[in-house]
Image (cartoon, grey):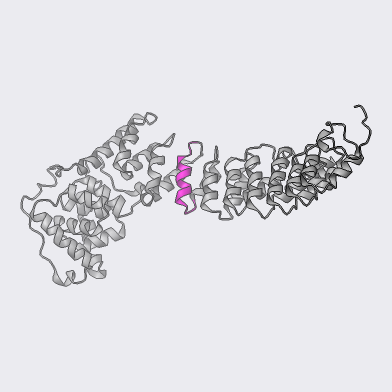
Amino acid sequence: MTPVPESTGRPLESVPEGHLSYQEAKRYARDADPAVRRALAERTDVPPEILYFLADDPEDSVRRAIVHNQATPALAHLVLVDDSSDDVRADLAERIVRLAPGLTADERDRARQTAYRVLERLVRDQLPRIRQVIAEALKDVADAPPEIIQRLARDVEEAVATPVLEFSPVLRDEDLLDILGEKPSTAALSAISRRRRVGPNVVDAIAATEDSIAIAILLANDSAQIREETLDLLIDRAADHPDWHEPMVRRPNLHPTAAKRLAVLVADRLLQVLSERRDLAETTIAEVKRVVHLRLSAEEPNSTPRPRSSLGEVPSTFAPAPLDQHEAHRWSTSLRAAYERACEMGRTGNLTSSSLSEAVKANNTDLVIAGLAIRAHLSPSLVQVILRAGSGRGIAAVVWKGRLDPSLSIQVQSRLGRIPPREVIMPNGDLAYGITESEMDWQLEMFSKVAREHGP
């Protein structure tokens, strides 16, 4: 570099890079014009102590230039980390995170030690935007400082915590379990549920929560390692969570029992998806298709109960059992209205498996109770007791007594009886309703006694 004689007044823009004297730098640093000081702060040939001096300049634009200047000494960053300007601190965060990979709390090199201290203070900044800048930059950095990642993952601001929770390879399963133990928000749970290869213990912890949104995301994550028993427990709860059904039906490596239970549970549009899967054993597919056939046969618009010699023919004339007025007085207004409607449906020949199936899908519990009672010549109070008890065998017995299609029993059990799919009484070989006629008679006798003694 050729020395240049010190000037007493030449404009800064006329001084070539590398030809700025120390005295000139001092003079320009005290110039009254902020544009001159900003231009000085952008140069790389300025002595470090002058740049350090400019880190405390009253003009924001000068301090921002100092942040971006690669020649700025590390100690100046310790001044800027507490800057009053949000933009200055945000610029500093964007710069300092480029130095973050590999940083540790026990750095020996002074410059790297200072960089860690600056980063540690920025991650505590009161402005969420500053912390978010750091989170977005470090979310997928494998050697990001662990202590910094831990703090970001627990940040109260979702925009800060969720990128790290979803992507950071620094977080181990043990860390995630600790965070889950702190009862995080739905956004945080959902972010963890979207991670690649969510471990089985983390899956279990998420599945144990009441957060249906996060669980739906977890089920849709093909890389989540969901144990068979965990999936079974979620299927038990799935009747109340229709948004879980599709990701369950589409999960890879679906075990046979889960496939058959889902065939009972899911909406009609998902049945074909389930029955056309190519990764299930032939015996499982055959069983799924059998359940699908039973369900769909009851939901066809013009379907009628299939004749079975052991059940007798469906009565051609409508004759409801005599109504006990004392009992009817205890019914709710909605049940009395439903009973009258069911009687009218019976008189017009419309009290069928198909119409009751539609009532089940519409969650019209009173109409289902009244319709089943009329078809089976039973007291509505008795049917109500059985339904409230959640008895699969009792429900199967009522449907049998009414000479209704066995698939209706499956629907009533799972949708209105809230019976977990694994406990639904299914057709079994020659047993159209899943249990023997003597067992069904006994169920009706037992519940009749309960209804007489305790009422609905």
Q: Position of residue 283 (x, y in %)?
A: 33, 31
Q: Quadrant of the N terminus?
A: top right
Residue 175 part of the magenta segment: no
Q: Position of residue 37 (x, y in %)?
A: 80, 44
**Toward the viewer: 91 or 408?**
91
Q: What residue is rendered at 51% in x and 36% in y?
A: 223
Left or right of residue 347: residue 172: right
**Toward the viewer: 381 or 50?**
50
Question: Residue 303 lies in what quarter of the image?
Answer: top left
The answer to whether 2 is drawn above or below residue 355 in the figure is above
Left or right of residue 18: residue 400: left
Q: Quadrant of the C terminus?
A: bottom left
Left or right of residue 305: residue 3: right
Left or right of residue 163: residue 36: right
Check the image and name the residue furthest to the left.
317
Q: What residue is rendered at 73% in x and 54% in y?
A: 84
Question: Residue 366 lies in what quarter of the image?
Answer: bottom left
The answer to whether 389 is drawn above or below residue 180 in the figure is below
Q: Position of residue 380 (x, y in %)?
A: 19, 62
Residue 446 appears in view: no
Q: Position of residue 371 (x, y in %)?
A: 17, 56
* Majority secondary structure of magenta residues: helix
**Toward the viewer: 161 or 47?**
47
Residue 214 part of the magenta segment: yes
The answer to whether 279 is drawn above or below residue 241 in the figure is above
- Chain part drawn in magenta: 208-222
Image mark count: 0
Residue 166 appears in view: yes
